[in-house]
Image (tube, helix red, strand yellow):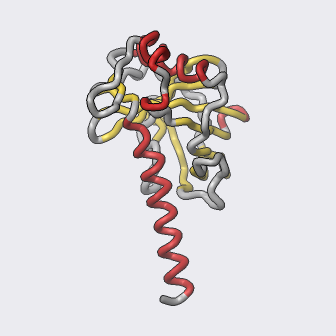
Amino acid sequence: MNAVALAVVKASLRVCAGLAFALGLTACFASEEELVGYWGADRPVSEGVYAHTPTHPDGREWDRPTWTGEITLEQRRYVSDAPNFPHQGARFHELFDDVYIVQSPREDGVGYGLAFVYEEGRVVSYHQPSCSDVADAVLETAGVSRDAEGYCPIQDLDQLEAIMRGVYEAANGQLRVDGVYRRVAE
């Protein structure tokens, strides 16, 4: 295999792994229906061209972005015409100052995570909490239980806010960052 072909294969694998990581972890806290509707959705991220870079489990960012494209707002959802946007159709709901619940529609339901918004919406980092990593006391306080497959079904917005606040507070705000979006152009 020549050097160019090898570089293309490696780049493709990085993109696929990054997308699988970004999308695959959203399954832990989930609901069958969207809990953040049009009127409950906030718009903290400014529109523009962004680069998405996942992070390694040790916290280091990958050496290059796995996705770049224009992100716009339609019906209070963040969307992109660029292929493979990892968070297509996401809605944000403010938990407290610059910390947001992110709702991401999926084929089998709706997944939830946390986002941290910086620089007036030009930089966003996100955390996909794993239900198995959350202490039983935090789950119990929010009225959430793990199902037989290890997922945490969420029933309503109050419960979602309670569990995400509990996840944040249990870690004293020091949560693992799973990826970063940076605006690279208007």
Q: Is residue 176 above or below residue 161?
A: below
Dividing the picture into quadrants, the one containing residue 90 is top left
Nearest to the observer: residue 50 or residue 28: 28
Nearest to the observer: residue 10 or residue 140: 140
Q: Does residue 4 appear to the left or right of 174 in the view shown?
A: left
How many dots with numbers? 0
Q: Does residue 1 appear to the left or right of 179 in the view shown?
A: left
Residue appearing at x 56%, y 43% in the figure? 178
Which residue is farthest right?
A: 119
Q: Horizontal and vertical percent for residue 120?
A: 70, 32
Nearest to the observer: residue 46 or residue 101: 101
Which residue is farthest front?
A: 136
Residue appearing at x 49%, y 83% in the figure? 5
Q: Horizontal and vertical percent for residue 64?
A: 63, 60
Q: Is residue 28 visible?
A: yes
Q: Is residue 161 visible?
A: no
Q: Is residue 18 above or below residue 158?
A: below
Q: Horizontal and vertical percent for residue 25?
A: 43, 41
Q: Is residue 125 above or below residue 82?
A: above
Q: Horizontal and vertical percent for residue 82?
A: 46, 55
Residue appearing at x 47%, y 66% in the figure? 13
Dividing the picture into quadrants, the one containing residue 28 is top left
Residue appearing at x 34%, y 24% in the figure? 146
Q: Does residue 167 appear to the left or right of 173 in the view shown?
A: left
Q: Does residue 142 appear to the left or right of 57 in the view shown?
A: left
